[in-house]
Image (cartoon, rainbow, N blue to C red):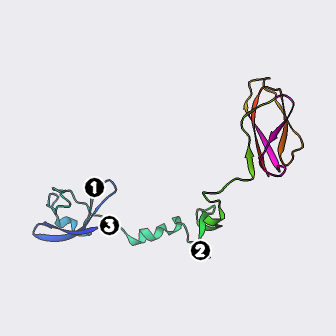
Amino acid sequence: MPTHKHITSKGKTVEYVSTIDAAGNEVIVIPGGVQDEIDDGAEMETISGVTDERETHEVAYDHSSIASLGTDKADKVSGAVDGNLAGLNATGNLTDSGSAISDFASLGHSHANIFISPEMVATGGMQLIPHTLGSPPANIMVSMTDVTVGGSLITVMEGPHDPSDVYVTIIPGGNKFKVLAYA
């Protein structure tokens, strides 16, 4: 938080603003036009036990140069829906994403309609893998977890799935796999 302080030099007392930056350093701002009236070695007030003699610098800005930055800033969203997440368009301006936080799955979201098998060893013939979906899977995916048998050519075939089992054939046998199935 900025603190207003005073510095005395050449018989004059001048007010200045002091703040602490993120690195813990004191930043001093002297009003424009006053710098010439202050000695480089002038003593300043103590701030939390810190201060000896400090070098001061004039800090000034021009409102017109700040206004010219207007073309490089993001525009506000007009017509945004309260609670929707912000997005960015191709030019970097803010947009209403059309989605609220409530549109996404919660932390407690469950995947009750997904089944992942334990790692299994292929037999080379059709295998029945029991699942817990309660209906035939809409899709399955076989993920090979160890392919040390039979070289680089592995054949995976699906059979007709039912409400309790996934049917797969993996040739050659001896390789390991997992099945992901979802309803």
The single residue placed furthest to the bottom in the displayed view is 79
- N-terminal label among 1 and 2: 1
Secondary structure beneath dot 1 equals: loop
Q: Is residue 26 above or below residue 74?
A: above
In the displayed image of the protein, which residue is found farthest to the left?
11
**Where is mark 3, residue-wise?**
60
Whole-percent x, y for residue 10 in the image: 11, 66
Residue 58, percent from left and from top: 27, 63
Q: Is residue 172 left or right of residue 37?
A: right
Amino acid identity at mark 1: Asn
Spatial separation of the CA atoms under disc 3 and disc 2: 39 Å
Residue at image mark 1: 25
Mark 3 against mark 2, which lies toward the viewer? Answer: 2
Asked if 13 appears above or below 25 in the picture, the reply is: below
| Neighbourhood count class around disc 2 (C-alpha, 10 Å): few under 14, some 14–19, many 20 upward | few
* Label number found at residue 82: 2
Q: Secondary structure at mark 3?
A: loop
**Looking at numbered disc 2 in the image, what kind of residue is underneath it?**
Asp
At x 82%, y 29%, the residue is 154
Tell me the mark number nearer the camera, choosing from 1 and 2.
2
Q: Please give left or right for residue 25 compared with residue 168 in the image.
A: left
CB-based contact (under 8 Å), mark 3 and mark 2: no
Kind of residue sitting beneath label 3: Ala
- Which residue is depicted at the point 58% across and 65% down? 93
Please identify, in this view, whether the residue under mark 3 or under mark 1 is nearer the observer.
1
Residue in the foreground of this view, choosing between 6 and 124: 124
Examine the structure image and report whether residue 46 is included in the region drawn in magenta.
no
Span shown in magenta: 123-144
Tell me how far mark 1 sits from mark 2, CA to CA: 40 Å
On residue 131, the disc is none
Tag 2 or tag 3, which sits nearer the N-term? 3
Please say if 73 is above or below 142: below
